[in-house]
Amino acid sequence: MKDTIQIAVVGSGYVGLVAAVCFAEMGHSVVCVDNDQRKVDALRSGDSLIHENHLPELLERYRNSKVRFTSDLGEATREAEAIFIAVGTPQGDSGKADLSYVEAVANEIARSLTSYKVIVEKSTVPVYTNEWIRRVMERNGVSQRLFDVVSNPEFLREGTAISDFLHPDRIVVGTDSEPARALLARIYEPLTNGSYYEQDDSIDGFRSSAAPPPLLFTSTKSAEIIKHASNAFLALKISFINAVSNLCEAADADVEQVARGMGLDSRIGPRFLRPGIGYGGSCFPKDVAAFRVVAEQLGVDFALLTEVENINADQKKRFLNKVRSALWTLRGKKIGVLGLSFKGGTDDIRESPAIELVEMLLAEGCSINAFDPAAMARAELVLPPGSNLRYMPDAYAVAHNAEALLILTDWEEFSHLDLHRLNGLMRYPIVVDGRNLYDPDVMSQNGFTYFSVGRPATQHVHELTTA
Ligand code: UGA
């Protein structure tokens, strides 16, 4: 028989909503709380609010039954054995994480607590947040016997969030309390004992009953640091390969070959070695900054993190210069932009390098036609359409009459465009690819002058022979 646990999840953003439906998928009973009544209403009526694979299907399966939505935190926590806090921790002053939402939730939980609960931080938070939550509870007069605080960081990526949650590399549980440890072990048991993967309709992924995910118990502080350190390390890997790509450009080498050669070393690994226009999104920029500030506050010199941030910022400027050198001058140029989200597979534009580049190009006086398969509605809110910026229905409409085409997001569909058709539509067949989606030789055979990241530029074949 299934061990069903009553869970409250506070926050219905990426992490909260995904955790809520995935806990239901694992057999638990979940109440998901958000203080935005419009979001609650939308979720109740089946609108998943974010573009995420498998989310509509799981929401349809469980909404208003195994996952209920409410704006009443008191009601949600009353029956729950575990309360997962998954609210935002935006970037505050000078990179510090703003924990005011976490604090507000802790205050509210404290006011409605009448029996023992395990409070679990799932939001990405700096080390010591656990202690702060504990202090907030105690300040509100809650006895220490009535709660434990656990750090259970989440490592899901946007776009593949559901399968990342259900097929994790590892599950980290940081706590010093035995009852809390036992409860978290029960919550994740369908994954750790492999039974979930035996279910007929389980979501596909790389885990199986023969290879279930490991559950790692640590101290609360270690778990908090694991999350920040993991994100910072991945960001470092990206900045490293971006710096190497600059070197490759200077030396006339090919960064894709270099990355392949490095990635085959099992100690390095091939993932997160894709050069581009810099990392973005709601996590890496914020988390690297927050980790840097935590180190500063603890008196530790972690200058490497500042360098990771500097390389990332430079990468966008370098790309802009590449466009400039491809076109000579930018003012008045008609440029096509493919991609606005911070990476392919998501409609999220937070800290998107693509959005930043569009802003830079507009400031230089370019006229832009842009297309993104999912992020245009969100992009229009921060970059309203006007005489210099138009949103187009597809990649070919963007190419029409363009003096250059820029690829800014690694959407799968941008990697197999009809090159012949594209070329025929453009005013000048110049492509500046910030995500290395194409083979330079194929581009030149198709008549393009092609610039990418960390690889020699290739000229349109005809130009080469007449030069
Ligand atoms: C990231 C982490 O990968 C997750 O493990 C973590 O849980 C999450 O942050 C979080 O803290 O919530 P996510 O922000 O969804 O996930 O995006 P990633 O797939 O990691 O990509 C981040 C950025 O790096 C994107 O702009 C992407 O284009 C860029 N990137 C990624 C590269 O430029 N090169 C690469 O090789 C990989």
Image (cartoon, helix red, strand yellow):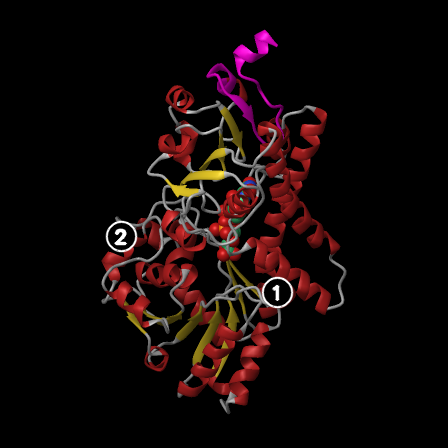
Q: Secondary structure at mark 1?
A: helix
**Residue at the outermost bottom position:** 141
Give the Cα distance between marks 1 and 2: 35 Å
Return the residue nearer the eye: 145 or 385. 385
| Three-letter code for the amino acid on which mark 2 is drawn | Glu
Does mark 2's beta carbon lie closer than 8 Å to ligand 1?
A: no
Q: Residue at x 48, y 23 (%)?
A: 428
Give the mark nearest the N terminus, 1 or 2: 2
Q: Position of residue 86 (x, y in %)?
A: 45, 67
From the image, tell me which residue sits under label 1.
Answer: 222
From the image, tell me which residue sits under label 2.
Answer: 57
Q: As displayed, is residue 82 above or below residue 266?
A: below
Q: Residue at x 33, y 38 (%)?
A: 393
Q: Position of residue 438 (x, y in %)?
A: 49, 26
| Three-letter code for the amino acid on which mark 1 is drawn | Ser
Return the residue nearer the eye: 316 or 466. 466
Any part of residue 221 in sight: yes
Which region of the structure is painted magenta? Answer: 442-467
Q: Position of residue 429 (x, y in %)?
A: 48, 22
Residue 29, numbered circle:
none
Q: Position of residue 70 (x, y in %)?
A: 30, 73
Q: As displayed, is residue 271 above or below residue 45?
A: above
